Amino acid sequence: MHLSEKNKKVLEQALESLKNRNYFSPFPENPKAYGEDADGLAKNWISQIMNNNYVALDGITASTPYIGEEVSPFLQVGIGVRYPVFSTNELIERGNAAQQTWSKVAIETRVELLMNSLDRISNRFFDIAYATMHTTGQSYMMSFQASGPHANDRALEAIAMGYQELTRYNTSVNWVKPMGKFDLTIEKNFNAIPLGLSLVIGCSTFPVWNTLPGLFASLVTGNAVIVKPHAKAVLPIAIVISELQTILKENNFDANTVQMAVDSIAVLITKELAEHTAIKQIDYTGNSAFGNYIESLNKVCFTEKAGVNSIILDSVKDLKAVAGNIAFSASLYSGQMCTAPQNIFIPATGITTPEGTVSYEQVVSAIKDAFNGLVQHPKAGPGTIGAIQADTTYKRVQEFAAQFPQALVASQHITNEEFKDARIASPLVVELTADNLAFNEECFGPIVFIIQTQNTAASLQLAYNLAKEKGALTCGAYTTDAQTMSQITEQMNSIFIPVSFNFNGAGFINSHAAFSDFHLTGGNKAGNASFTNAEFVNKRYVWVGNRYMN
Amino acid sequence: MHLSEKNKKVLEQALESLKNRNYFSPFPENPKAYGEDADGLAKNWISQIMNNNYVALDGITASTPYIGEEVSPFLQVGIGVRYPVFSTNELIERGNAAQQTWSKVAIETRVELLMNSLDRISNRFFDIAYATMHTTGQSYMMSFQASGPHANDRALEAIAMGYQELTRYNTSVNWVKPMGKFDLTIEKNFNAIPLGLSLVIGCSTFPVWNTLPGLFASLVTGNAVIVKPHAKAVLPIAIVISELQTILKENNFDANTVQMAVDSIAVLITKELAEHTAIKQIDYTGNSAFGNYIESLNKVCFTEKAGVNSIILDSVKDLKAVAGNIAFSASLYSGQMCTAPQNIFIPATGITTPEGTVSYEQVVSAIKDAFNGLVQHPKAGPGTIGAIQADTTYKRVQEFAAQFPQALVASQHITNEEFKDARIASPLVVELTADNLAFNEECFGPIVFIIQTQNTAASLQLAYNLAKEKGALTCGAYTTDAQTMSQITEQMNSIFIPVSFNFNGAGFINSHAAFSDFHLTGGNKAGNASFTNAEFVNKRYVWVGNRYMN
C-alpha cells in the first residue's frame, strides 16, 4: 500500500506544522461544513442504537454476552446500549495474533490505512457527537468538536510523529570503514521492532479525545491495541473502533488489531488486563491514584493524571474581558476538563489596570458578575456548562456548597430547555484566604476558588508550590508587566508547567491545539505523557540493527 | 557563541551520518595520525602524575582531602594518583549553581563549546590511553582507540542528536486560527527545559567510552553533570573532566558544570549521590544488581547492565576464518567487553561448509586451534588479551578452571614482554552439554563456553531463552542458509537483540561504531539506554510551551 496523493499532501502539511507549531487541521470544527443531512441522520442513529446491542464489532458469536451501564447525563436514564463482552484471554489471544501480522506491515501501509480511517471516522462525527453527549454530558458543540475534529487532529498528529520517527534513519546501509590498506564493509539494516500488545484505558469525560493519541500512536508504530473504555463512556469510542475494524478487514488485515474490552463498574477488568504479561505498554487517562498504580507496573506507560490549574491575576488591560474569559474557562463543561482552572489568585492590594489600581473587592465582584452573567444566560449558560458526567462529581459540588454556605457564586440548577432532566450544577465559586487549605487539592468539577494573597509574588509562590506537589496541565496568568511575566514564566517552567498569558476573547487556557500545543509536558505530576512529543511514539518500539558480512 | 565554520561542517556530517548510519569519524583511530611526539610526551606525563596529587580540577582548597586507590593491572602496583575529595553537599551545591546558568545557555553555544572540548580532549588522547591502560588493563591500542577516538565519536554523536532534537521545533510561532469571521491569534514559544542535575556513574573497564555518551548528552541538553567514576578507574575520565572545566572557564562558564566525585571502595558514595533529591537523572554502566537498584529509584535513568552474548554456528564458508574471528572476539581484552561473546552453540551433528558437513568435533578442534594460535602468538597474544582489570574477575577464572579441569583450552598466564608483572589470564574455553546450566549466567571475563546442541533450532532456542532472561548486547550467528538467517533474525529481534551474521576478517561482533550501530537497544535486560537514539537525549529535558495574547 502506497500513500495516496491526497494523504501524502496532508501528511506533508502535518509534518510541516508539527515542526513549525502553526495552526493546522484537515477536519473542520464547524458542524455546518459536513452537510445538512449529517445531524439528522445521527439523531436517528442514536435513537436507534439506544436500548440495543452494539453488534458492529468483530468476533461476536451467538454465545457472546453483552453488557452496558451508560447513563445519559442529559436524560438521567440509562441509554441501554449493550456491548459484547470478551474474556481477557480471548482479547489477549486475538491481540497477540494481530500483533504478529500488524507488526510486520510497512510503515507507509500503516500510515495510509490509518489516515484513511480518520476520513471514515469523520463520516461518523455526528454519531460520535451524540454518543459523547449522552455519556459525558458535554454540550452538543463540545461533543462534536472534542470527540470529532479535535480528536482526529490529535490522531493525525500521532500518525505524523510516528511516520517521522520511523523514517528518520536509513533502514539499510552498506557501511564502509577505511582501514588503511583495505576497506571493512558491513551490510546493515535497522528495524523498528514494535514493543507489543498495547492497552489504552479511556476516561469518562473525554472518551475519544484522550483515547485517540495513544491508540493511533500504538497503531502507527506497529502495535495491536486493546481499548478499555470507561464503563460509563463506551459508545463514542466504540464507533471509532468499529470504523477501524471495518477498514482493517477491507484491506485484509486482522480486525483484532484494534479490540474493545468492556467491563462493568461492579467487576472492573482494567487491572487484570494491565498486569497481563502480554500487555507491553499502557496509555491511561484518569485519576492520579490509578495512574500511579499504572506507572508502578514497570511497563512502558503514558499517563495523564489529575492536576490543579491556577490563574494568577496581577494586572490587566480590560478587567471585564478578563473576568469573562476566566468565567468561561472555568464554566466550560462544568470544569470537567483536565485543563480547567480551579484556583484564581488575587492580591489583597488589588490589581493594576490602565485606569489605575482596582481593589481586590472590585476584581472579585467583576468575576462574580461574569460567572452569573454567563451561567444565567438562557442560551450560553446551558450550552457552556453542559451536564455533570458522574454522580461523584455532582455530590462533590453539593458537599462543597454545604461546606461554604457563604459562597461568592452559588452552584445553581439552571434549566436546559432541551434536556429538562439534565444533571446540572453550575460552578460554585468560593473565596478563600491563603491559609485555607481547601484549594490545595484537585476538586474535580464546577468548583472554583478565589484565593486572596498578599501580592503577586505570593500568588506565584502558592501556584508554584501546588503545581510542584500536585502537578498541573496549565497555568493562566494576567500581567501587563514584563518583569512579572518573566518571573512567572521562569518559576512555573522550572517545574515543567506551561503558562498562558493574558488570554481573552476567543482564546481560552483550556484549549490545547494539535500540532502546536503540547498537551501535558510529561514533566510534572499531572502525567508522564505529552501529546505529541517524540517520546510518545518512540517508546512504542525498539530500534534493532542487524549486520551482515560476506 | 556561534558555531564556527569548522564545527558547522563536522556537525552537518555527523547529522548526515546519524541519519544514514554510514561510517563517520572525525577522530583518526590510528595513533600515528597524531604526530610523532605525542606518545613520548604522554609517557612522560603518566610517569609524572603517578604517585602525585591530581590538582587539575576546580574547587580545590588547601584543606581538600585526597584519595586514590587505582592499581595498574599491567604493573600490579598502585599508581598512586590521589584525587581531590569533595563532600556530597559541596558537589550538589556547586552542581545546582552551575545548572542555573548552564541551563540557560543557547543550544548553539553549548554545541560549539562541547565540540571544541572534543578537540581539546583529542590533544590528550595519549595521556588518556596510558591512564586507561594502567587502570583497566586494556592493551595500548585498545586504550588509545576506545578511550580516545571511539569515545569522542560517541560524544559527538550525543551532541549531534541533542542538537537535532533541540532544534526540531520552531521555538516561536505566531499561531493564527481562522474562526470564520475573525482570526484567533496567539503568540507561542517553546522551550526545552533541562531536567536538572545529572549523575554519570562510570565503570572500571571502559571509564571513558561508557561515560562520554551520558556526560555529553546531559551537557548538550543543558544539564550540569557530576561524574562518579569507578574508584579503580578515575584517571582517564579525570583528564576529560579537566579539559571540560578548562574550556568552560576560558569561556566564562561555571567550571562546576562538570564535576568529579571520587570515592573509596571502602566508603562508596554512589547511593548517597543517586538518592539525593537534587539529582534528577542518572547514567549508569556496571553490574545488573546495582543497575536494577538505579532503575528502582524512579528517576530518569539510562542503564547499561550485564548481558550474556551468544554465537550460533550453523554453516560457514571458511571454518578456519570463522574460528579465528570468534577466538579474537572472545579474547579481545580478555572478554572484559560487554559485547564479548560468552556462549558458542554448535550442533552435535556438525555444521555445513562448502566442502560438506564438518563434524562437531572438527569445529571444536578448529576453535581450540584458533584460541591457542592467537593467545600463544608472542606479539598478538598479549596485545589482544591485555590484562585483567579486577581481582574478582581473575579469581572467577581460577574458580572456573578448577571447576572444569578438562577444559578444551586452559586459561594460561602468558608472558607480556613489556609488563612482566601483568595480571594475565588467557581465555578458559569449556565444552558443555546443553543441560549444564553453567552457561546460563554472565561469567564476566575470559571464560567461554562451547555448548553442544541438538541442532541449530535448539541453539537458537537456547540463545533466545538466555537473552530473554538475562539480556544481551549482541548475538553472533554463522549461517549460509537464507531461511535460517531469517529465523535467527526474527526470533532474536523479537526480544530486541541485534544479530551480526558471518563476521570475519577485521569485522568483530564486539565493535559498535558510533553514528551507525546502536550500542544496546534499550529493549532487553542488558539495559534501558541506547547509544544514541532520540530518547537518550529527549528524556533529559521537557518541552514547555508558553502562550501570549494581547
Image (spheres, coloured by chain):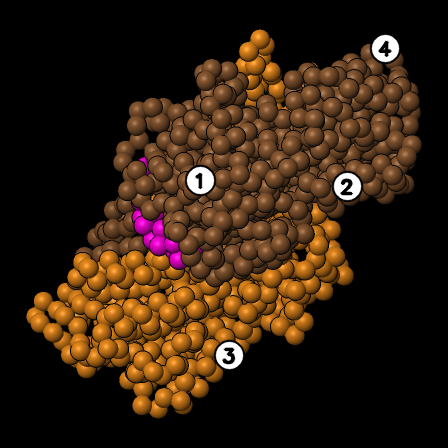
Chain colours: A orange, B brown
| Mark 3 or 1: the one toward you | 1
Stretch of the chain drawn in magenta: B91-110
Q: Secondary structure at mark 3?
A: helix
Q: Residues within 10 Å of mark 4 (few under 14, many from 20)?
A: few
Q: Is residue B461 left or right of residue A505?
A: right
Q: Secondary structure at mark 4?
A: loop
| Picture quadrant where residue A36 is located | bottom left
Tag in front: 1 or 2: 2
Labels 3, 1: one chain: no
Residue at horizontal 82%, vertical 11%? B354
Same subunit, tags 1 and 2? yes
> Mark 3 belongs to which amino acid?
Asp
Q: Disc 1 residue type?
A: Ile
**Foreground residue, B211 or B506?**
B211
* Residue A212 image offset from top left, x and y in percent: 50, 53
CA neighbours of label 3 inside 10 A, class few (<14), some (14 to 19), many (20+): few
Give the foreground label among 1 and 4.
1
Q: Reply above or below: B142 against B62.
A: above
Residue receiving disc 2: B395
Magenta: main secondary structure equals helix
